[in-house]
Amino acid sequence: MSKPKVASDWMAGCAGCHMSLLDMDERIIQIAELVDLRSTPITDLKHPDESGVDVGILEGGINNTSNEEVAKMMRKRCKILVALGDCAVFGGVPAMRNFFTIEETLRRAYVETESTDSEGKIPDDPELAKPTRVRAVHEVVPVDIFVPGCPPDADTIFYVLSELAQGRRPVMKDDKLHWH
């Protein structure tokens, strides 16, 4: 039997969830023996296989049109989609931006910050992603498994990946995980 293919990506967040994945330490070798790790922010492969993967993992909220594309591509190319971490599950800290208009946040970030010189300007290039309201992954695409935490601890991530690699759905334990 071939190993299940797993792909991951990050969007609007701090990368802490992928750092927590790496915090599995030597257990990451066990995961590598169980799954075929495909595209991730820690590999050279940047997009999930066109032919599809068994498990897609998204970290971070969705705060621009590029993140929307990433989420839609992952959903289209995976059988099971995992929202990893509070930003992916709820919007997390990046969603605090939703209390202000996009114009206000861009002005503060690029023009009004104390570190901006007198020539600060808001970037405006057609190649840049357009900012949006910050959303959890399930607000843009259907999610199968929610793994909250900021970040989820390495034990939780190991458990989720181990269960999925063995063809099982992870179950709720100590209010750390729920799935649909």
Image (cartoon, grey):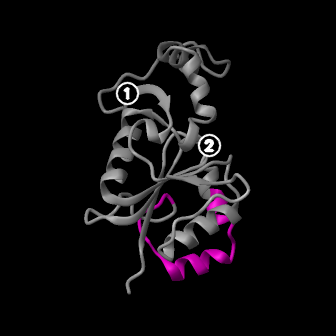
Q: Quadrant of the N terminus?
A: bottom left
Q: Nearer the viewer, mark 1 or mark 2?
A: 2
User: Residue 177 location in percent, x, y?
Assistant: 63, 54
Distance from Cα at disc 1 to Cα at disc 2 = 23 Å
Q: Pick whichever of labels 1 and 2 is earlier in the sequence.
A: 2
Any mark on residue 86, and which?
2
User: Residue 58 location in percent, x, y?
Assistant: 48, 51
The extreme left residue here reads 51
Using a 10 Å C-alpha cutoff, classify the residue at mark 1 as few (fewer than 14 neighbours), some (14 to 19) or many (20 or more).
some
Q: Quadrant of residue 31?
A: bottom right
Q: How many marks?
A: 2
Q: Which residues are magenta?
A: 19-41
22 vs 122: above or below: below
Residue 175 drawn in magenta: no
Q: Amino acid at mark 2?
A: Asp
64 vs 157: above or below: above
- Determine whether, in the image, residue 130 is placed left or right of residue 108: left
Which residue is found at the position 64% from the left and 33% from the top?
A: 93
Any mark on residue 28, and which?
none
- Determine whether, in the image, residue 57 is placed left or right of residue 20: left
169 vs 81: above or below: below
> What residue is shown with label 1?
130
User: Residue 98 location in percent, x, y?
Assistant: 55, 21
Using a 10 Å C-alpha cutoff, classify the residue at mark 2 as few (fewer than 14 neighbours), some (14 to 19) or many (20 or more).
many
